[in-house]
Amino acid sequence: MQLRDLTKGSTVFLGVIIAGYVSTSYVDQRFATQLDTNDPAVPACVGEDGSWKNWLWPNVPALSPKCE
């Protein structure tokens, strides 16, 4: 292995770590502020029309109960 190859590999490795940290910080700032921690937790539920209620995220939990 040449020093040049080691330098390239180390640079890529460091770049991936920095990109992961920056993207995690972005997601935390963007989506965590949407959650209101002052209100009591309202669980996600399925409405009569089949749509999800009380859920901000694009993925939905499986087996959520029907809304009352």
Image (tube, rainbow, N blue to C red):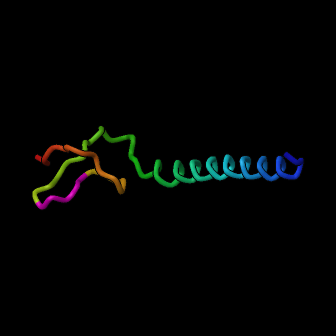
Percent of width and height locating residue 16: 67, 50
The quadrant the N terminus occupies is: top right
> Which residue is farthest front?
1
Q: Is residue 10 left or right of residue 48?
A: right
The image quadrant of residue 47 is: bottom left
- Magenta stretch, main secondary structure class: loop
Residue found farthest to the top: 40
**Residue found farthest to the bottom:** 49
- Residue for point 24% across, 45% down: 62
Counting from the top left corner in percent of width and height, residue 64 is at 20, 44
Give the side of residue 15 with respect to residue 50, left or right.
right
Q: Locate residue 20 relative to residue 67 in the image: left or right.
A: right
**43 relative to 20 in the view: left or right:** left
Number of marks: 0
Residue farthest toward the right in the current orientation of the protein: 3
Write the residue at 27% across / 51% down: 54
Magenta-drawn segment:
49-53
Q: Which residue occupies the foreground of this view, 5 or 21?
A: 5
Nearer-the-camera pick, 18 or 28: 18
Whether residue 11 is in magenta: the answer is: no
Residue visible at 52% across and 52% down in the picture: 27
Using the image as rendered, state which of residue 2 and residue 45 is in the foreground. Answer: 2
Q: Residue at x 83, y 47 (%)?
A: 6
